Amino acid sequence: MLSTLGQLIKFMRVYKKFWMAPLIFGLIALGGLLIAAESTAIAPFIYAIF
């Protein structure tokens, strides 16, 4: 996984696609939130948002 992120960062640096960084970090944060919410008591509140 780290090599994939490293390649993605290298791609953004070489091709000057820095606008992709907030999208990628947002998707990673959203995925982490959903994974964390599966096993906690706040799951019903998180799923109500979506």
Image: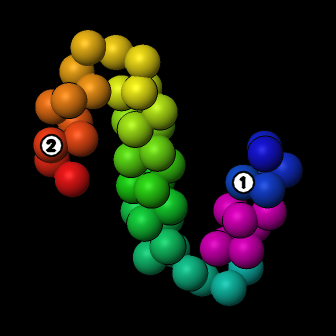
- Quarter holding the N terminus is top right
Q: Which residue in the structure is indicated by mark 2?
A: 48
Earlier along the polypeptide chain: callout 1 or callout 2? 1
In the rendered view, tell whether residue 9 sits above or below residue 37. below
Between 48 and 13, which is closer to the camera in this rendering? 48
**Residue 28 counted in the magenta span:** no
Disc 1 is placed on an element classified as helix
Q: Which residue in the structure is indicated by mark 1?
A: 5
Residue 44 in the image, given as x and y percentages of width and height: 20, 29
Between 10 and 28, which is closer to the camera in this rendering? 28
Task: Say which amino acid is labelled 1.
Answer: Leu
Q: Is residue 41 left or right of residue 8?
A: left
Look at the magenta stretch and give its main secondary structure. Answer: helix
Between 26 and 13, which is closer to the camera in this rendering? 26
Residue 41 in the image, given as x and y percentages of width and height: 26, 14
Residue 35 in the image, given as x and y percentages of width and height: 47, 33
In the rendered view, tell whether residue 34 sits above or below residue 40. below
Rendering quarter of residue 11: bottom right
In the rendered view, tell whether residue 33 sits above or below residue 38. below
How packed is label 2: few (under 14 Cα within 10 Å), some, or many (20 or more)? Answer: few
**Extent of the magenta region:** 7-13
Q: State whether residue 48 appears in this view.
A: yes
Report the residue that reaches farthest toward the top.
41
Disc 2 is placed on an element classified as helix
